[in-house]
Amino acid sequence: MDRILALDCCNRWTCGGIVSEGIPVSEINVDLGRSQAARLPSVVDSLLSFSGMSLQDIDAISITVGPGYFTGIRIAVAYGVSLAKGLGLPVIPISSLEALARGANPIVGDLIVPCIRAGRDAVYSAAFYLADDGFEEIMAEKERSLSDLSLALNDLDGFPKIVVTEDRTCRDMQYGGSINLIPRIGGIATALTAWHRKDYAVDPEAVKARYHRDPGIGGFSR
């Protein structure tokens, strides 16, 4: 499984990346708005063109399966699974939160808390510690209210660095530490996450989205 094509549609930006034997080859990051579903195949074509590759050169497809925007997750899963099935390739399902943590360019010893907005006063969040041998999840991925997240951060050892994709994500949370804005996860971070998770590749039929809430349930507000 040397070459992996990875896609992320969990946030506003559509991100794609290709990694070969653990080395980033190329990435593409575009804001497609409501045309995401229609234009995703052309994004993949452009990514392959940038890389000097074709789909026949790819060994696995990877997609972020959530959490994040419901529509974006659904689009990525539907397209990625269909593409993998057509090519006879496995799929590497990855967490958008882990990819976001990797996109923060952490160094060994960092404690990263990636957060994606889940609606008013709520976020999808987790916590990852970067050890010498890679990321260790030390706070489980789930939807939390801002007050619950603030309490959870107090229970963590060290100095958590919050990473968000929108400046309003944790704006109303009582927290005195660092909050870093990264508008998009990025194709390279997505592809590298896929490489580190390649041992968890599955048959396309086994891929499941991770929404962490039912669509339309809760105080969602954009």
Image (cartoon, rainbow, N blue to C red):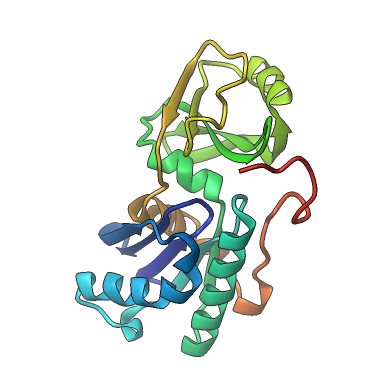
The picture places residue 30, in percent across and down from the top left corner, at 35, 58
Residue at figure coordinates x 50%, y 59% from the top left: 9
Residue 94 in view in this figure: yes
The picture places residue 23, in percent across and down from the top left corner, at 27, 57
In the rendered image, which quarter is residue 1 located in? Answer: bottom left
The picture places residue 175, in percent across and down from the top left corner, at 58, 14
Residue at figure coordinates x 68%, y 34% from the top left: 120
Residue 115 appears left or right of 42: right
Residue 93 appears left or right of 61: right
Quarter of the picture containing the C terminus is top right
Relative to residue 117, is residue 214 depicted above or below?
Answer: below
In the rendered image, which quarter is residue 202 located in? Answer: bottom right
In the image, 115 versus 59, the foreground residue is 115
Residue 134 in view in this figure: no
The number of numbered badges drawn on the structure is 0
In the image, 149 versus 53, the foreground residue is 149
